[in-house]
């Protein structure tokens, strides 16, 4: 079987048009994971009454559920249950008016929050407890301790792991076609269907994923170095 390089190039061209969609979904999901993951990790780190055990259970549950099931469950909810709920709440919006990109963001956002929580908890554990006790002994409030002691040391530890999370989100975004989103993977599949050159199409989209991942890894290293220097200067 001959490999059709022209079909591969055509698949790459078709897929690159939707690279922005893939990156948009992945980056927004990452931001959600960082913000909510940090909040939940702090609640669990300081063992806040009621909230800490609740989030511990939720994190454990979602951590054990495959991402594909999250996509299926949320799509079924939105497609069958959203309109009755919206009607009962008096909302004017309906399922057909919802951009499927937002459903994909919610799905990947849940994955990002669960992983983000664990990333921050791991980063917090790298900070020696004695430093936090010392900060409080000199009169720092809990928020000051978090801002000036905990985060400056934990964030540089977390950055490379969040780089890996972003990579995983980009790869998981291939499931977005399940909720009606056309991303680089589904665009490659469509290109392969049109010319019956699936191998060439998938090799082409694999090259795009590889290039994006390589750029993210390099950016993550540079960001980690820059943050380490900046945080140390800020604390000094």
Image: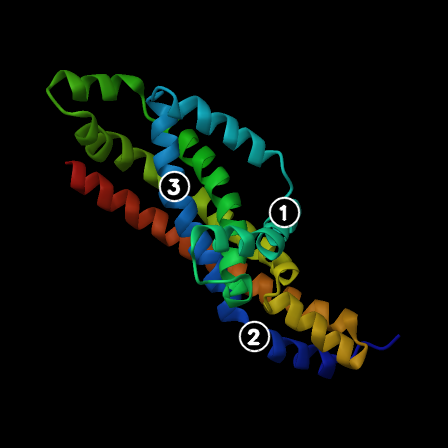
Q: Real-space Cα distance between discs 2 and 1?
A: 29 Å
Which residue does the image show at 48% across and 54% down from the upper left? 86
Give the numbered dot on residue 36. 3
Which residue does the image show at 81% across and 77% down from the upper left? 196
Q: Which residue sits furthest left?
A: 139
Within 10 Å of the Cα at label 3, are there few (<14), some (14-19), or many (20+) other Cα atoms?
some
| Disc 2 versus disc 1: nearer the observer | 1
Location of residue 188 in the rendering, given as x and y in whole percent from the top left corner: 67, 72
The residue closer to the viewer here, 85 or 76, is 85
Location of residue 232 in the rendering, given as x and y in whole percent from the top left corner: 22, 39
| Disc 1 versus disc 3: nearer the observer | 1
Q: Real-space Cα distance between discs 1 and 3?
A: 21 Å
In the shown orientation, is residue 53 left or right of residue 2?
A: left
Q: Secondary structure at mark 1?
A: helix
On screen, residue 56 above or below 26: above
Location of mark 2 (residue): 16
Counting the numbered discs, the total is: 3
Q: Secondary structure at mark 2?
A: helix
Location of mark 1 (residue): 73
Q: Secondary structure at mark 3?
A: helix
Are the residues at dot 1 and dot 3 in contact (C-beta closer than 8 Å)? no
Within 10 Å of the Cα at label 2, are there few (<14), some (14-19), or many (20+) other Cα atoms?
some
The residue closer to the viewer here, 8 or 221, is 8
Give the numbered dot on residue 147. none
Which residue does the image show at 44% across and 22% down from the upper left? 53
Specify the quadrant of the image occupied by residue 37.
Answer: top left
């Amino acid at each position: 079987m001959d490999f059709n390089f022209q079909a591969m190039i055509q698949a790459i061209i078709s897929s690159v048009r939707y690279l922005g969609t893939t990156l948009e979904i992945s980056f927004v999901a990452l931001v959600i994971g960082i913000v909510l993951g940090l909040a939940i990790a702090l609640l669990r780190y300081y063992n806040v009454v009621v909230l800490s055990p609740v989030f511990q259970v939720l994190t454990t549950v979602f951590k054990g559920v495959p991402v594909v099931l999250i996509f299926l469950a949320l799509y079924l909810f939105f497609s069958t249950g959203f309109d009755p709920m919206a009607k009962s709440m008096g909302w004017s919006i309906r399922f057909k008016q919802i951009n499927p990109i937002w459903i994909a963001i919610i799905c990947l956002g849940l994955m990002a929050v669960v992983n983000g929580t664990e990333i921050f908890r791991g980063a917090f554990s790298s900070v020696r407890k004695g430093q936090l006790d010392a900060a409080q002994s000199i009169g720092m409030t809990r928020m000051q301790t978090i801002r000036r002691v905990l985060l400056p040391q934990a964030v540089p530890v977390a950055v490379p792991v969040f780089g890996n999370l972003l990579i995983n989100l980009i790869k998981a975004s291939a499931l977005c076609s399940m909720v009606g989103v056309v991303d680089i993977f589904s665009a490659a599949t469509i290109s392969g269907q049109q010319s019956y050159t699936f191998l060439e199409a998938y090799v082409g989209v694999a090259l795009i994923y590889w290039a994006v991942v390589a750029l993210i890894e390099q950016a993550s290293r540079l960001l980690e170095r820059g943050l380490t220097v900046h945080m140390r200067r800020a604390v000094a």
